[in-house]
Image (cartoon, helix red, strand yellow):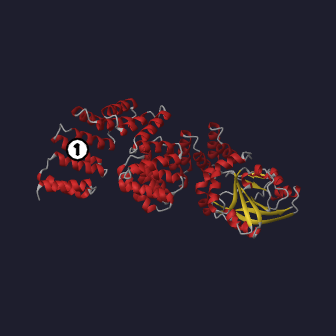
Amino acid sequence: MSYDILFQQALTAHQAGRFDEAEHLYRQILETAPEHPDILNLLGLIAQEKGVHNEAVELFYKAIQKAPKHAPFYFNLSFSLDASGHPVEALENLQKAIDLDPDVKEFYNQTGIIQYKSGHVKEAQEAFLKAVSLDPDYSEAKSHLAMTYFASDRAKAVSFLENISAQYKEEALSRYFLSTIFFDERRFDEAERYAREAEKITPSSDEIKTVLGLIAAQKGNVDDARLYFSQAVNLNSTNVQALVNLANIETNDKNFEEAEKHYKRAAVFAPESLDVHLNYANMLYLADRTAEALEEYRKAVIINPASSETSNNIGIILKDLKEYEEALALMFNAFYMEPEREEYAVNIAETLVLFSRSEHEKALNAAQNWATHAPDNVFAKHTLAALKGENIEDSEVYSEKLFDNFAGNYELVLKKIAYSLPQRIRELAGNAAGTVIDLGCGSGLVGQALKNPQNQIIGVDISQNMLNLAAEKKVYAKLIKSGILEFMQTKPQADLIVAADVFGYLGALENIIAALKGYNICFSIELLSDRPGYQISDNGRYRHNPQYVEKLLQDNGFSQISKYETVLRQENGEDVKGLIYYAKP
């Protein structure tokens, strides 16, 4: 077959996206013309499309050796150098392209992109302005120029982008940038509007598909998010962000085998990505592959020793391995890097409690040091009080923050500790009719147990994240965010009020029992038998003496008081004993 026919077939396959076929034909041509610069360049472009940038760089260099005066080769080389983490070399080769042909707008646009990513805003602006001076209608360079103003003047950048999108009806980049800006600002409807406009203009853009996937995920449309991320990966197999998010969806659905495939592909294209290693490690941890998870987290530490998330996550694994002292060192490191991350404080509190059961003095000293350095942190204060055995009246703030952070894996934890209180209350309450108020409803397990055609259930909780979980059960007529004492002061109408596993977070019960006066009530307590009143435990929960509870009930006019022994949950393999009270005026 002649060179011209073979070359034409290769170009046709290349342009149609049949890269393997095109590569095979190009390599056939190289057998007879091994130093043909155009063929070397085209093979470099295919390697670039496949994300194999090291190979692309090698091919472009070979093409340049044979045709050192051909500016486009330097331009192509700059893309792969930048993609493989060599921005300085990429800029050097772009300058060579400009020196050879100073009137190509794309050279300046690409220079601006790399300069901006490298943090050189002034140089980026100069490059984009030069590109626009060569073509006043070069909307891509205008859009990139607009983004260079974002850090210093957000309003100017947005206005600039909006003007570009209004002026150029078939211009997608400005709309894409607007969608990313509004997404970061959590203005998801506006982000989606611009992303969909961009998608209509450029339906084959993997970046636009990715942002649509991110928006869908934030809106809770998991199936749509999976579809968009899959489309992005099909369009560009090297799209690391789409691969990681697709893997995260599979991880959340416990499809660990599928998730691992996506994480490993992402790691091939971005071996130094902290995001890839952290998410992959999280999947391994959830799949009970603890040793592998720890190794993956350690890779993340090498990439970024200052990552608070990495320190925290390694700490969690070490906690599970009962290496409490080392775990706490890492968790405190994470906390002091980002003290506003409340999940870090929750992890420290939980680990201190576990540590205290074998090394009480060390745990107490660590808790004291934490409270000294973070005096306003409610978890530090509450944990120190619990380890010292000192009752503390911070229940509402502590409970709200605790359960907002606990919501994500709340029901999974309850299954692990054999929590069966909702079923026991259902047995005692029977087919409760009328209006039932579920105080401290949490994720809605009690409401789910009590719901029947004869009642309507109102859920009350201080944690919005818990109320969101309860709403998914679709058993509540109404869900109200409120502290339970604050809610009871509204004197709601109710035929039965339930408070399952709630009083353990209150301590003193005088005010709440008084507020429940006149109602039929059903509630649980954790049993305290060795002292009067109530006492905080090392885990931060309160136990109550039955005599204390029953006197409060009697003092508030409850004449029919029934109590039932129960096992509330298991801790460290042992039953936690409690009582369920059913009291009527």
Nearer to us in this view, 234 or 291? 234
Q: Is residue 118 left or right of residue 76?
A: right
Q: Is residue 181 left or right of residue 117?
A: right
Residue positioned 36% across, 54% down in the render: 235
Which quadrant of the structure image shows residue 89?
A: top left
Pinpoint residue 303: horizontal percent, then vertical percent.
Answer: 41, 44
Nearer to us in this view, 423 or 444? 444
Badge 1 amino acid:
Phe
Pinpoint residue 103: horizontal percent, then vertical percent.
Answer: 25, 33
Nearer to us in this view, 367 or 18? 18
Category of crowding for the residue at label 1, using alpha-carbon neighbours closer than 10 angstroms: few (below 14), some (14–19), many (at least 20) = many
The residue beneath circle 1 is 60
Pinpoint residue 129: horizontal percent, then vertical percent.
Answer: 35, 31
Q: Is residue 358 left or right of residue 75?
A: right
Q: Quadrant of the C terminus?
A: bottom right
Please say whether residue 297 is visible from this viewpoint. no
Pinpoint residue 57: horizontal percent, then vertical percent.
Answer: 25, 44
Q: Identify the secondary structure beneath mark 1.
A: helix
Please say whether residue 214 is visible from this viewpoint. yes
Above or below, comparing residue 73 to residue 286 in the picture? above
